[in-house]
Image (cartoon, helix red, strand yellow):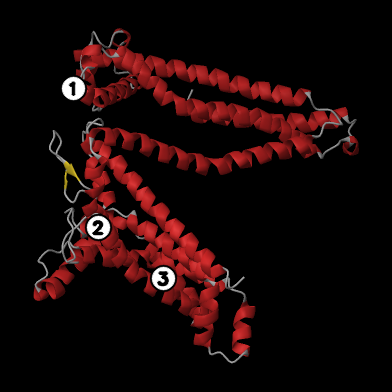
Amino acid sequence: MPAIWIALIILALAVVGYVLGVKRALSLAGGDSRRLHSRTTYYGWNVALFAAVPALLVLVLWLIAQPVMLERAMSGAIPEDMLSEGANRSLIIADVRNTANALSAAEQKGLLSAAELADPAGNADAIKAKLTDAGIRFASGATPQIFAAAEHYSASQSTGRKVITVLALLAAVAGLAFATMRIHPEFRARNVVETFIKGLLIACSSIAILTTVGIVLSMLFETGHFFQAYPWTDFFFGTTWSPKFGGGSQLGILPLIWGTLYISVIALAVSVPVGLFAAIYMSEYASSRVRSVVKPAIEMLAGIPTIVYGLFALITVGPMLRDYFAQPLGLGSSGSSVMTAGLVMGIMLIPFVSSLSDDIINAVPQSLRDGALGLGSTQSETVRKVVLPAALPGIVGAILLAASRAIGETMIVVMGAGAAAKMNLNPFEAMTTITVKIVSQLTGDTDFRAPETLVAFALGLTLFVITLALNIVALYVVRKYREQYE
């Protein structure tokens, strides 16, 4: 049974449990709800939560563990001689999965006979011909061994669905029965429900922390494997980026860091002044009518896909900078440059700075403005010496968000700045960033044991550390200046 149907059945049982809980509580109280410790709805929610939450937890844990279990089942069904080539292991497993999906689709359409379904390996040629005629996509290089492994994969998947269906429904029924049976007039249903809800809230709030820990640990482990195959000194202090699958790679990160910071600085030089001045105008000078038009117009920039910004950089901004600035000044002849990507990225970041800064400035108490104006300050002096210092922590947060967005941008850099990893002060030269190289190293059929692939995790961890350093600097600035206004 599909997981969505299992979840719907569990939720239906929870609804039934709610009704049973309310009715049982009223029945034991003789129809007088005043004899109950808690309101009748708490008794219903108590049964519903015990029926739904444990069963859904079992279902979620199964969905997380299922891919690993199925991969192990596939590995056991694939002959050892096919897995001897480690570089092809992931491709073989993908072929098995695709073939299993094709067999399932053909079975649903009634294209295969019972004999073919019973022995797909022995009828591999006939099955491939029928799948091809029906237009069903499958692994083009599927062998009889692949078909046998695919059949084993489908059988394991079917068995797993039956097992999880039984376990999840048993957990739901057991929780419903347990919660219903312990209902009595003195039962503190409200306390139990509130404790249950509190536990759920704690679990939900822990997801972000656990996700961050998981991301960091995964990058750390893979980065450790990379540094076992490639010297860390050459990675952190190398000035040449030239990956070559098969040996002889030079994987120095300094050109990528230079390109990332260079493009990000130009983008922030555009977005921070424009966005901050726009926020000051909207919050302090603009009328409500003008604000109602200008603010949504600026925020529309945030809704434009980055690929559209990339096309804008490639087709419009790049050629314009080349024809009117780079070539006349003798600084370059390419439309792909740091300046192109920086300017377009800066335009994209304007709403991140302006919207957040506008909200923060509006949150400054009006009493501060009134006090400054009452002492004889002009409106501009009030903004410069009172409003902006009071809103500085929020403004720093907005700039930090824009900086993190700039450092992590990929598509605009690919289309606007090119892919050349080099260190140059000329802003009209093509360069690249860390994120672009992470994508390029993980694209295509790659060997995840090779340093040329594992370097992507080292690059990701470096990017994470840079972002963390930005957060620490911003926290220091906020704490330092906040003390003057509290």
Of the numbered discs 2 and 1, the one sitting upstream in the chain is 1
Judge depth for marks 3 and 2 and give the one in front: 2
Instruction: Give above or below for 32 relative to 359.
Output: above
Point out residue 476 in the picture as x, y percentages from the top left corner. Answer: 49, 62
What's under tag 3, amino acid-wise? Ala
What's under tag 1, amino acid-wise? Gly
Residue, x 22% and y 63% (percent of image)? Answer: 338
Instruction: Give above or below for 137 relative to 34.
Output: above
Point out residue 45 in the picture as x, y percentages from the top left corner. Answer: 72, 36
Residues packed near mark 2 inside 10 Å, few (<14), some (14 to 19) or many (20 plus): many
Residue, x 14% and y 69% (percent of image)? Answer: 322
Residue, x 27% and y 67% (percent of image)? Answer: 343
Point out residue 233 in the picture as x, y percentages from the top left corner. Answer: 24, 44
Instruction: Give above or below for 166 relative to 291.
Output: above
Q: Nearer the viewer, residue 33 or 229?
A: 229
Q: Nearer the viewer, residue 355 or 328?
A: 328
Q: Which quarter of the figure is the C terminus placed in?
A: bottom right
Q: Which mark is residue 258?
A: 2
